[in-house]
Amino acid sequence: MLMQTEFEYYYNDVPGKGLCRNNLIYTSLISRDRKTFCQWYHNDTDYHRGQNQIVDPSLMEEKWQRETRFLIEMAWKYPDLVPKILEIDQIQKKIYFEIDGMDFWQRADPVRQDYDSVLPDWRSQMLRIFRAHRSLGIYKYSLHPSSYFVVDGMLKSINYFFCYTDKDIKISLKSVMSHISEDRQADLFPKMAAMGIDVDSPTPFKTIQLLAFESFKTNFPTDFMDLAKEIYV
């Protein structure tokens, strides 16, 4: 059935900026009926419009492995917190999800970010997702509101390529800057300085998680991100 489905590039339509790529790592595809979303772990220059950030095939492979590893774990332990997986194509490196319309950020309006109008209880639902990550020992740094879909009134989490556990070797923030947009980098550096984080030094995953919550105060209410931080403190 998926072979017969027509897909197109998926962009976020941001007022004042126009069509912006939905993700910096993979190529985002969506079916024309807006019922299926596809993460394609392929460095597609047309999609990224020459602004490709992950150009190293080995790094793309690592992101694919992390995505499938943590997504499958979530789907096994917390199946209601991720979209239904329709297929994982290990050859093409594509993951197909069942969705219902545009992502959470787009539906809320990328400028107004009116999440309440889309899902009145989004706060409690998102905190439940964070608690699920914590229970599995997962540190997830891709928290952008476009990393969620709403299906049948339930918030569903995607983008597990930027996840680690304490079994992983500690990383420096510099080593993952290609995963992070320039706008967010500009926001991150003063926050890193305030937290005493050296961009070149290996940093505890918990510290990076708290930094991520601080950074995403640009997309979510400050008091809500402070509640999220408490889950990991």
Image (cartoon, rainbow, N blue to C red):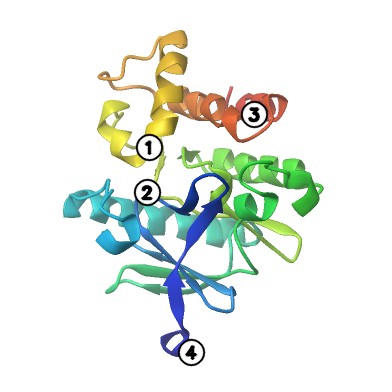
Q: Mark 4 vs mark 1: which is more N-terminal?
A: 4
Residue drawn at x 37%, y 33% as measured from the top left: 182
Estimate the spatial distance between the alpha carbons at disc 2 and disc 1, rounded to whole Å: 8 Å
Residue 126 vs residue 205: left or right? right
Estimate the spatial distance between the alpha carbons at disc 3 and disc 1, rounded to whole Å: 19 Å
Q: Mark 3 vs mark 1: which is more N-terminal?
A: 1
* Among the 4 quarters of the image, the one containing residue 89: bottom left
Q: Are marks 4 and 1 in contact (CB under 8 Å)?
A: no
Q: Are marks 4 and 3 in contact (CB under 8 Å)?
A: no
Look at label 3 and name its amino acid.
Met
Look at label 1 and name its amino acid.
Ile
Task: For mark 2, give the secondary structure.
Answer: loop
> Which residue, given by chain and number where applicable, does mark 4 sit on?
1
Q: Label 1: few (<14), some or many (≥20) within 10 Å?
A: some
> Which residue, given by chain and number where applicable, does mark 3 sit on?
225
Residue drawn at x 72%, y 46% as measured from the top left: 115
- Which labelled disc corresponds to residue 180? 1
Estimate the spatial distance between the alpha carbons at disc 4 and disc 3, rounded to whole Å: 40 Å
- Where residue 80 appears, x then y in whole percent? 66, 61
Residue drawn at x 32%, y 51% as measured from the top left: 63
